[in-house]
Image (tube, grey):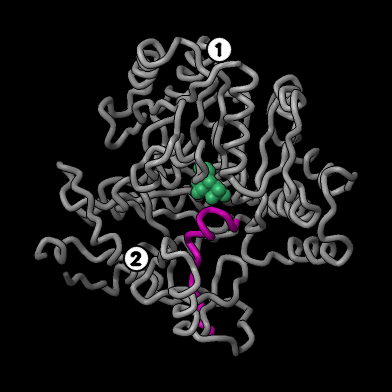
Amino acid sequence: REASLQENDVLLPKMPPFDYSPPPYNGPSATEILQKRREYLSPSMFCFYKKPLHVVDGKRQYLFDEDGRRYLDAFGGIATVCCGHCHPDVVEAIVNQTKKLQHSTVLYLHHAIAEFAEALASKLPGDLKVVFFTNSGTEANELAMLIARLYTGYNDIISLRNAYHGNAAGTMGATAQSSWKFNVVQCGVHHALNPDPYRGVFGSDGEKYAKDLQGLLDYGTTGNVAGFISEAIQGVGGILELAPGYLPAAYSSIKKAGGLCIADEVQSGFARTGNHFWGFESHGVVPDIVTMAKGIGNGIPIGAVVTTPEIAQVLTQRSYFNTFGGNPVCTAGGLAVLRVIEREKLQENAFVVGSYLKERLTSLKGKYEIIGDVRGRGLMLGVELVTDRQEKTPAKVETIHVMDQMKEKGVLIGKGGFYGNVFRITPPLCFTKEDAGISLPLACNSHYGSL
Ligand code: PLP
C-alpha cells in the first residue's frame, strides 16, 4: 500500500530554530539495542515505527536521535512530559534531592512529601486534600477502587467501555478494551455504555447514556455499588471526550447507589486540557477521589490518590503501605513540575496553542476525506482516521503509515483508540503556535482513493 506525502501538506517543513544541539552520542547503536531488547526484554514491548526510533537526548518539546536529528515530540512520552524534556528547574530539584537523600521511607518525616502533598491539595476543589503517593497510575487506581470498596462496604465498580485504567488485576478489570485484557479473574466490575459522541449509539446525548447507566445499576447490580471510575477524556481510548451532560447525571446515579465517584486524571490532569487544571472540572463535577500520575512528575515515576479526610480514614483500619510512594526525589521533582506549570503559565499555553491546533486540524478535515473526527481539549487532541466517513471504517493501516511518514518528517505523535486508528497529540505543554503550525502531513485522500 503506497501513499505519499505532498510537500504542501507540511505547512512548515523546516523545524523552527532551536538553540541546543546534543553532544555527540558514543553509546551502543540502535541495532545493538534492538538485539538486546529482543533477547532480554519482554516480547510484549513493541516499537511504534517500522524503523524503531532510538532517542538519546531531550530538551523542551524536542527529542534527539543517535545522529543528533531533532524531532518535534507531539506525543510527550504518552501525555507525560508536561513541562518539557529535562526542564532545568525539574532537573535541579531532582539532582539536589538525589545528592542529599535518595530514599527514606514514609515511616520517617521528610519535607518534600509534605510540601508536595500540600501543593497538590491546593489545586483540588472542596475537601479533596488527603494525598497518598504511589508510583504509577495503575497503583493509584487500584488504591482508589480499594478505598471506594472499604468506605462503602460494597464491591461493584462501574467503569466505562473503552476506558483504560491500568494493568494490574483490579485496574485491568476496570479497563474495557479487549486488547488490554488478559483472561484472568477481574471480578466486580461492570462496564457501562461509553458516552462516545462519535461512535456511540446515542451520539452526543449524554443524558441517554446516563439513563442506560441507571439501567445497569438497576438490573446488573444489587442497586448498591462501591464506585464509578472514569477519565474526563479517554486517552488510550482515542482522546475521546465524554458526551456533554453525562458525568453530572452519572455521578448523581452513583451517589444514589451509595458509591464514590473516582476521577482518573492520569492523562487529563495537571493542566493538559487547558481550560482547567483537571479534566473533570470541564464537566462541572466534584469527585470523591482523584487519581493522577504521568504529568505530575514530568516523567518521574510518581502517582497519587487524593480524597477527603473522612474517606481517607478507611485506610487506618489496617496497615497500608507503599515502599517507594512519596519518595523524596519524586516528590521534590513533582513539586518543581507544579511550580514550572504555574510560573510559565503552561495551562494557559495549553489552552491557547491547543485551541489553535484544534482549529488547524479541523480545517484539514475539509481537505482530507480520511479524517473522520477531530476532538479533544487543550493539548490533548485526537484525529480519527476512517476510510469511509459514512461507515466510519477505521483506517488502521493508513494510521500506521502516516505516523511513519510523520516520523520521517521529524514529527512524533501517538496512536490509540479501540481500532488503533486515532492519532493522539499530547505534546509537552510548552508546545508553541509555531510547532502547531507543522500540520499533520496527511497523505491526501486521492492517494487513498486509489488504494
Ligand atoms: N489511567 C489512565 C487514564 C491511563 O492513561 C493510564 C496509562 O496510560 C493509567 C491509568 C495507568 O498508568 P500507569 O501506566 O502509570 O500504570
Which residue is at a point 74% across and 19% down the rendered structure image? 310
SS at badge 2:
helix
Residue 409 to residue 137: above or below: below
The residue under label 2 is 403
Comes first in the chain, label 2 or label 1: 1
Which amino acid, by three-letter code, is at mark 1?
Gly
Q: Which quarter of the rendered picture does the N terminus lie within?
A: bottom left
**Residue 153 as seen in the image, left or right of residue 310:** left
Residue 71 lies in the magenta-colored region: yes
Residue 34: horizontal and vertical position, in percent? 45, 78
Q: How many marks?
A: 2
* Image vertical order of residue 29 relative to residue 118, above or below: below
Residue 329 image offset from top left, x and y in percent: 78, 57
The range drawn in magenta is 67-81
Residue 343 in sight in this render: no
Spatial CA distance of label 2 from label 1 is: 45 Å
> Residue 72 versus residue 189: which sits nearer the camera?
189
The answer to which quarter of the image holds residue 395 is bottom left
Quarter-of-image position of residue 17: bottom right
Q: Is residue 49 left or right of residue 143?
A: left
Quarter of the figure with residue 431: bottom right
Q: Which residue is mark 1?
A: 258
Does 126 appear above or below 373? above
Callout 1: few (<14), some (14-19), or many (20+) C-alpha neighbours within 10 Å? some
User: Which residue is depicted at the point 59% across and 23% down?
Assistant: 149
